[in-house]
């Protein structure tokens, strides 16, 4: 008999990939019609040019969902595209002096090639790339639509500005000493104009919408809630003491969530970076205040606000009157107050707030307890201060004795009646500033005209294309690069025709990714970002897979844009995504030398497997071993292409899916890959053996199967269908791909145990085919290439990529084995697993073959076999002696 062909993934995988493409298996229709639809999406990559293991994991997980949904009978949309604009590409362009317009398509082509090798079931006809004007014109379109609805506006905002670099810097580019990343000292806060989306207008809706996202991870929902940060409280106004009509400001409003503690207020606080503070500083205090403010400006915001930071303040010299009591309270600048939260002013209640307590101690402010803890036994009003728990009021006049909640309500009423306060809700969410002083982004379609002011471009003028890179000197410094190009900036005003200038900022790339999921639905549509009919047919996204690092910003902008799209009549859903899967990181051991920093991990992994303690190849020092996220800088990456070259795409896919459930971190283990590779080879041999068995079997044979053959068939089918049930369950309900793969491994082991690989196996051809076809279906979402081989050998119709998920045969599950008690001369000697419909002859044969039974029978002849079907077999043997 011919030698089985050795497993050659490279050959068979390209073969099946071509077959899928030729059959158009993954092309989605514009409208799924009456068929159930499933839109499976993964976060699109930034086209760096090279696939890394994080991508592989992300896209393999998504592919399981897409392929499984298709097997389940859904009409599936599974697209892919490129998040191509943004800073990394611009920096690379600066470094190489190559236009990003040239480099990007090359990177995309390269990465696409790499992605294709994984055998991902994408509808490539829908591919999008955000750097193309036909994509980003819709960013501009959204901008204009939102501008017309007052949901986009220009504001002044505080940024880090370095005069050495002559540019605005990100927070990450400035250290705590206010020195810039290129070494210039004295980075200052400067107010610049920027464009912002009024996302805060949707805060309430974005919060309420979270309740409907029952299939999002709880952790992500919590992060979104926290970021939105709804805080319900009261505003309370304090009038200036001394009634100085010439003073620039007459009152301060504080925001508080603990109005009931008002009688304990000892001061009103402002932020040192709040420009309003100058309205309150008296000449006597101006020197002290100036030095405090200067010191605060030199302190990093995060350090100033840290919970552990010492609380400090300075008296402004002015006072305000307590609205309830009329008592004068000092106005103080304090380091922990935020200028941009609530009303930017706080009432200081040292007895009940830890930060206020710290400040009062530092500044010698009086501490007045106004809440007594709930009395236990002997009434005791004393508490360790600051006390932030529940209780009833004290030292609060008419409110004494009321519980906190009662007092809060009655004081709110009093404040409203007295006209010095009322209910107020504050959010942590801020409007989304999206102006960037960068080249490689979407130009903002605005012109500034001396006569007409800020003029939006008419829709017909879109796209406003980025000017040529060749005309620029990109340095990464010097402010908005587009300002350099006169041909771009100097244009006639769209309204009056007079000489005017364009906006030179570009958009944050989060704008691109806020609505890309809709573009896939009608990528050629020319009237709007998405054809409303396609959106109605396909939205929301059924499964969205991506990294948890996007838990806050991307997902929030994504949800915001979906609501905007609905208001613009583009779609009918409020929420973009039904099920969100946030995959864990791909980690690997990294090795660090005390003298040489990180050392390349790959050569050391073998040593680690050999249990030799790793040492530095340069200085022989013992290395520190850490498990960290795979990255270039840590030299611990694994190249997915090398993996595919060596083991094939199926092994690569199975490994990443098997090593951890999607949400958990995955720790790279070379032995794990070897293990998967052995499994795949074993599977291959089993399939190849069936090819021979099925070819050898005369297809017309209709003889009645032997009892042994029937038994083998029953066992195989029982194993097969119980696995099918398990795998379906793991994939569909629990998304536990690793346990699904474990079940498949057990199945393969079980089939080997049934001798299905052996030439003397009596299993019938019909069952062999069934085993192969059902196996193929189960493998198809996970290891789609070998699944096709399995399907083909099993005589499946067309491709398994076009097949349906098989139904579990309940009978195969039931008609399983039963436990047959075997007696020798009436004494129980064995319990055998036998086919449920076992007959007397087979039972006898199985019993006589059992080692335990043999021991008790010995050499003696069997006189009689008493068989009670389904229960018992008694062998009667001659008694000894
Ligand atoms: C008086 C008070 C007494 C407060 C007390 C707390 C405890 P959340 O829940 O985060 O909204 N606050 C208000 N505006 C602030 C600002 N701009 N910078 C720093 N702190 C500010 O917190 C609301 C509480 O944070 C408010 O309630 C206020 O202090 C403080 F026993 O008012 B509270
Ligand atoms: Zn004009
Ligand atoms: Zn070293």
Image: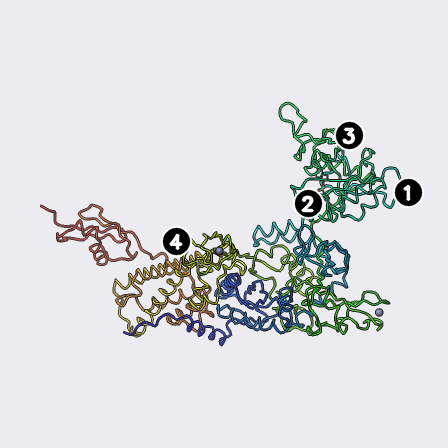
Q: In this view, does 236 lie above or below 400?
A: below
Q: Earlier in the sequence, mark 3 or mark 1?
A: 1
Q: Check residue 245 in the rendering and tell me which mark sits there, or answer none.
A: 1
What is the CA distance from the residue labelled 1 to the residue labelled 2? Answer: 35 Å
What is the CA distance from the residue labelled 3 to the residue labelled 2? Answer: 36 Å
What is the CA distance from the residue labelled 4 to the residue labelled 3? Answer: 76 Å
Closest to the camera, between mark 4 and mark 3, is: 4
Q: Earlier in the sequence, mark 2 or mark 4?
A: 2
> Looking at the image, in which quadrant does ligand 1 appear?
top right
Residue in front for this viewpoint, 868 or 494 = 494
Residue annotated with mark 2: 305
Q: Check residue 878 in the rendering and tell me which mark sits there, or answer none.
A: none
Closest to the camera, between mark 2 and mark 4, is: 4
Residue 486 x, y percent position in the rendering: 77, 72
Residue annotated with mark 3: 398
Q: Check residue 611 in the rendering and tell me which mark sits there, or answer none.
A: 4
The crowd level at tag 4 (other Cα within 10 Å; few <14, some 14-19, many 20+) is: few
Residue 644 seen in this snapshot: yes
């Amino acid at each position: 008999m011919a030698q089985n062909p050795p497993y050659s993934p490279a050959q068979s995988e390209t073969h099946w990939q071509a077959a899928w493409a030729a059959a158009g298996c993954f092309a989605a229709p514009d409208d799924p019609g009456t068929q159930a639809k499933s839109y499976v999406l993964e976060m699109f990559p930034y086209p760096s040019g090279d696939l890394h293991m994080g991508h592989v994991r992300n896209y393999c997980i998504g592919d399981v969902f897409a392929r499984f949904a298709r097997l389940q009978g859904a009409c599936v949309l599974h697209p892919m595209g490129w998040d191509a604009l943004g800073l990394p590409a611009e920096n690379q362009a600066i470094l190489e002096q190559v236009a990003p317009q040239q480099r990007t398509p090359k990177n995309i082509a390269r990465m696409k090639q790499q992605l294709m090798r994984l055998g991902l079931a994408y509808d490539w006809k829908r591919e999008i790339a955000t750097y193309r004007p036909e994509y980003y014109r819709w960013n501009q379109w959204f901008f204009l639509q939102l501008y017309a609805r007052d949901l986009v506006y220009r504001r002044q905002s505080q940024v880090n500005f370095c005069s050495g670099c002559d540019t605005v810097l990100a927070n990450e580019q400035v250290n705590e000493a206010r020195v810039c990343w290129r070494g210039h000292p004295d980075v200052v806060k400067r107010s610049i104009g920027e464009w912002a989306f009024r996302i805060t207008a949707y805060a309430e809706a974005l919060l309420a919408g979270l309740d409907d996202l029952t299939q999002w991870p709880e952790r992500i929902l919590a992060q979104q809630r926290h970021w939105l940060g709804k805080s319900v409280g009261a505003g309370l106004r304090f009038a200036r003491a001394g009634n100085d009509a010439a003073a620039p400001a007459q009152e301060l409003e504080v925001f508080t969530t603990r109005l009931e503690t008002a009688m304990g207020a000892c001061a009103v606080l402002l932020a040192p970076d709040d420009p309003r503070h100058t309205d309150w500083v008296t000449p006597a205090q101006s020197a002290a205040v100036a030095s405090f403010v200067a010191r605060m400006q030199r302190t990093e915001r995060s350090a100033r606000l840290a919970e552990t930071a010492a609380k400090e303040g300075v008296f402004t010299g002015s006072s305000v009157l307590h609205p309830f009591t009329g008592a004068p309270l000092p106005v103080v600048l304090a380091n922990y107050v935020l200028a941009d939260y609530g009303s930017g002013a706080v009432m200081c209640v040292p007895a009940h707030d830890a930060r206020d307590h710290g400040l009062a101690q530092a500044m010698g402010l009086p501490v007045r307890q106004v809440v007594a803890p709930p009395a236990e036994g002997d009434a005791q009003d004393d508490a360790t201060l600051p006390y932030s728990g529940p209780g009833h009021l004290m030292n609060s006049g008419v409110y004494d004795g009321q519980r906190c909640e009662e007092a809060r309500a009655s004081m709110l009423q009093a404040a409203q009646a007295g006209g010095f306060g009322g209910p107020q809700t504050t959010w942590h969410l801020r409007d989304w500033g999206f102006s960037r002083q960068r080249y490689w982004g979407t130009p903002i379609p605005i012109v500034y005209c001396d006569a007409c002011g800020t003029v939006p471009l008419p829709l017909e003028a879109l796209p406003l294309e980025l000017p040529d890179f060749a005309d620029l000197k990109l340095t990464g410094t010097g402010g908005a690069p587009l300002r350099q190009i006169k041909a771009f900036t100097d244009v006639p005003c769209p309204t009056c025709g007079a000489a005017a200038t364009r906006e030179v900022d570009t958009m944050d790339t989060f704008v691109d990714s806020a609505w890309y999921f809709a573009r896939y639905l009608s990528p050629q549509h020319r009237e709007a970002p998405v054809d409303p009919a396609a959106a109605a047919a396909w939205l929301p996204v059924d499964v969205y897979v991506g990294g948890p690092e996007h838990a806050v910003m991307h997902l929030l902008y994504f949800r915001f844009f979906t609501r905007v799209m609905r208001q613009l009549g583009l779609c009918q859903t409020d929420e973009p995504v039904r099920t969100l899967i946030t995959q864990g990181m791909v980690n690997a051991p990294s090795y660090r030398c005390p003298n040489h920093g990180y050392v390349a991990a790959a050569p050391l992994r073998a040593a680690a497997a050999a249990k030799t303690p790793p040492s530095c190849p340069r200085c022989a020092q013992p290395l520190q071993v850490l498990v960290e996220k795979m990255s270039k800088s840590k030299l611990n990456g694994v190249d997915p292409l090398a993996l595919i070259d060596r083991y094939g795409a199926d092994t690569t896919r199975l490994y990443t899916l098997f090593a951890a459930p999607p949400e958990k971190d995955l720790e790279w283990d070379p032995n794990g890959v070897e293990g998967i590779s052995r499994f795949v080879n074993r599977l291959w041999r089993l399939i190849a053996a069936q090819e021979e068995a099925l070819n050898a079997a005369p297809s017309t044979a209709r003889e009645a199967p032997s009892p042994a053959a029937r038994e083998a068939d029953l066992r195989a089918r029982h194993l097969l269908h119980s696995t099918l049930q398990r795998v379906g369950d793991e994939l569909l309900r629990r998304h536990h791909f690793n346990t699904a793969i474990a079940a498949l491994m057990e199945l393969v082991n079980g089939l080997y145990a049934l001798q299905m690989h052996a030439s003397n196996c009596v299993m019938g051809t019909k069952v062999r085919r069934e085993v192969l076809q059902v196996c193929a279906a189960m493998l198809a979402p996970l290891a789609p290439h070998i699944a096709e081989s399995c399907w083909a050998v099993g005589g499946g119709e067309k491709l398994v990529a076009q097949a349906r998920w098989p139904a579990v045969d309940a009978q195969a599950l039931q008609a399983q084995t039963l436990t047959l008690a075997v007696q020798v001369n009436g004494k129980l000697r064995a319990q055998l697993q036998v086919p449920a419909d076992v007959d007397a002859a087979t039972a006898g044969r199985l019993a006589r073959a059992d080692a335990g039974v043999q021991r008790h029978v010995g050499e003696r002849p069997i006189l009689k076999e008493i068989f009670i079907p389904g229960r018992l077999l008694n062998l009667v043997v001659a008694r000894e002696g």
